[in-house]
């Protein structure tokens, strides 16, 4: 193969990941970072805010009052980093921020120092959320406002029901794993779910009930995917199913 057949390396980017921080401990230094606090709360993290009370903005104060985050009413101390998995800082003192970053490096704790890209192990970007669907746009710290503009442009072009459709696919996958749990079934499960995703529109998936999905799973063994109208017509008629509904099957 010639080298022209492979993509060129484009340095200067970030590795965009879906970081699972459920039940991880996140320390927030400063009381003005409401948006980032909400981001980590949405990811089911355990959040502690360290800030003098006069430094809290209204939203952060609200989340403290509601018990959504733990709160320490004072300035940062190095011991606050004990057993912490992630650190977010947003304080006006640049020297204090840099000192926190250095302490995080010593302890190998991932940190984001607000408005100081060189002292960030990760960036937050601009996120569109629709149920399980998350789309992030990042400018690698160079143009946050532009990231918001691009994110809104993408969101405007997405179908309104895509989040609900994804939830239905996720539920169907869980149900499928219960009837075909063996590891060696993995390739067939994946292949069949691809057929399902290709065969049904977003509207079909949103319309699909639990009973519809239970009926659909009867077609996993023969590796078939019936059209939704046929699927609904078959409900209650499949106790003695033998795979003979070929006239309604869209995929062989």
Image (cartoon, grey):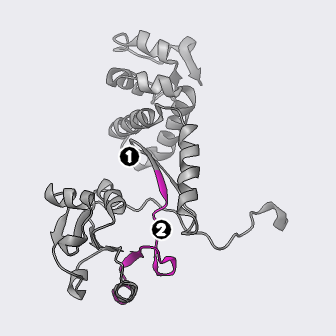
How packed mark 2 is, by other alpha carbons closer than 10 Å (few <14, some 14-19, many 20 or more), is: some
Which residue is found at the position 58% from the left and 44% from the top? 153
Magenta span includes 124: yes
Q: Please give the label number shown on residue 123.
A: 2
Res. 1 in view: no
Depth-wise, is mark 2 or mark 1 nearer the camera?
Answer: 2
Q: Residue at x 46, y 76 (%)?
A: 121
Q: Secondary structure at mark 1?
A: loop
Q: Quadrant of residue 24?
A: bottom left
- Provide the residue designation for mark 1: 182
Asked whether residue 226 is in view, the answer is yes
Q: Is residue 23 above or below residue 187?
A: below
| Coordinates of residue 173 in the picture (x, y in percent) | 40, 38
- Asked if the residues shown at circle 2 and circle 1 are in contact, with their CB atoms under 8 angstroms apart, the answer is no
Q: Where, quadrant-wise, is the C terminus in this rendering? A: top right
Q: Position of residue 208 (x, y in %)?
A: 40, 23
Q: CA distance from mark 2 to mark 1?
A: 39 Å
Q: Quadrant of the N terminus?
A: bottom right
Q: Residue furthest front?
A: 54
Viewer-side residue, 135 vs 149:
149
- Magenta segment: 103-127
């Amino acid at each position: 193969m010639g080298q022209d057949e492979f993509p060129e390396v484009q340095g200067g980017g970030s590795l965009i990941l879906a970081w699972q921080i459920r039940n991880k401990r996140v320390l927030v230094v400063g009381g003005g970072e409401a948006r980032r606090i909400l981001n980590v709360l949405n990811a089911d993290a355990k959040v502690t805010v360290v800030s003098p009370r006069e430094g809290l903005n209204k939203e952060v104060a609200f989340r403290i009052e509601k018990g959504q985050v733990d709160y320490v009413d004072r300035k940062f101390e190095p011991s606050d980093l004990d057993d912490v998995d992630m650190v977010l800082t947003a304080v006006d003192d640049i020297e204090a921020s840099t000192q926190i970053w250095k302490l995080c490096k010593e302890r190998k704790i991932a940190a984001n120092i607000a408005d100081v890209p060189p002292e960030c192990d990760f960036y937050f970007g601009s996120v569109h959320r629709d149920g399980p669907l998350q789309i992030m746009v990042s400018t690698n710290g160079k143009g946050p406002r532009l990231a918001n503009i691009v994110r809104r442009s993408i969101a405007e072009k997405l179908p309104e029901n895509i989040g609900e459709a994804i939830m239905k696919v996720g539920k169907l996958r869980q149900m499928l794993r219960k009837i075909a749990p063996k590891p060696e079934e993995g390739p067939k499960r994946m292949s069949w779910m691809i057929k399902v995703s290709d065969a049904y529109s977003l509207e079909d998936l949103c319309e699909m009930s639990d009973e519809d999905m239970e009926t659909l799973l009867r077609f996993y063994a023969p590796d078939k995917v019936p059209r939704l109208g046929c699927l609904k017509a078959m409900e209650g008629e499949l106790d003695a199913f033998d795979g003979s509904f070929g006239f309604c099957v869209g995929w062989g």
